[in-house]
Image: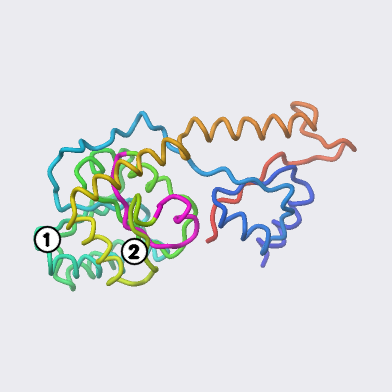
Amino acid sequence: MCCGLLDRAASAWTNRFVAVSEDAARVARERERVPARKLQVIHNGVDLGRFAPRDAGGAARCRAVTVGRLAPVKDQATLLRAVRHVVDRIPAFRLDIVGDGESRRDLEELSTGLGIQRNVEFRGYHEDVVPFLAEADLFVLSSTSEGVPIALLEAMASGLPAAATDVGGLREVVVDGETGHLVAPGSPEALARAMQAIEDDPAAARRMGQAGRRRVENHFSLAKVVEAYERIYLECLGRTPPGALRGREGDWRWPIYSVSSTS
């Protein structure tokens, strides 16, 4: 309630709002009453030069990776239960969990309880995730709420197909059936089927990975994001004296307010 009131108050003093997804923009309009005329969507982006697409002729590795904070909103518990289903069909399947957080101990205990501790590796936090992406066949995301996660964009830039939950801004990134599979959140069975579908058809997985790389190049490159923010800052500065950031009546204004996610 407090944050909502602050957001609405800030709206009157802000020139432009930026949302990282259409879903976040919808929430800003409907819940925070942000005027549509002040609101613009600028998706997150990644530096394409840091992520090399996987060799299209490479052999399948039966290995998935997920990257993110270990927390309830990321719902890695559902992911572990999905892995249990996948391992029943593909005993060699492996999952790297890259990240750390409050849920780590509970997730490690759940992994042991499910009997998949040999199939799941908790890698901890790493600043550089490129080596883990390079070793995987697919990227998986089990969140119950998301904006446009950088980790997903990095995986797609690396040529990985995605198995992800259909929440928040994820459908704006993953094209279901073209760059990966979207499933309902909280369903281990559905997430397992998505991962199995990718592992069962390496040729289709490569096509999805290549399509994902092209999608990031076309819509989510860091260069495009920087250009979009540069334009919006210049527009704001064009209405206020540079440096002072004052309105026409001499009132102080914040030039831009960011709306990052629906959570």
Q: Secondary structure at mark 2?
A: loop
The residue nearer to you, when weighing 100 against 225, is: 225
Q: Residue at x 29, y 64 (%)?
A: 79
- Dot 1 crowding, Cα within 10 Å, few <14, some 14–19, many 20+: few
Sequence-wise first label, 1 or 2: 2
Residue at 12 percent across and 43 percent down: it is 59
| Residue drawn 11% across the image and 61% down it | 118
Q: Is 163 a magenta residue?
A: yes
Q: Please state which of residues 125 and 86 is positioned toward the viewer in this rendering.
A: 86
Residue type highlighted by circle 2: Ser
State the separation of the CA atoms marked 1 and 2.
19 Å
Which segment is the magenta one? 158-175
**Above or below: residue 49 compared with residue 21:** above
**152 or 251: nearer the eye?**
152
- Rendered location of residue 249, percent (x, y): 90, 38
Residue 156 image offset from top left, x and y in percent: 34, 44
The residue carrying mark 2 is 103
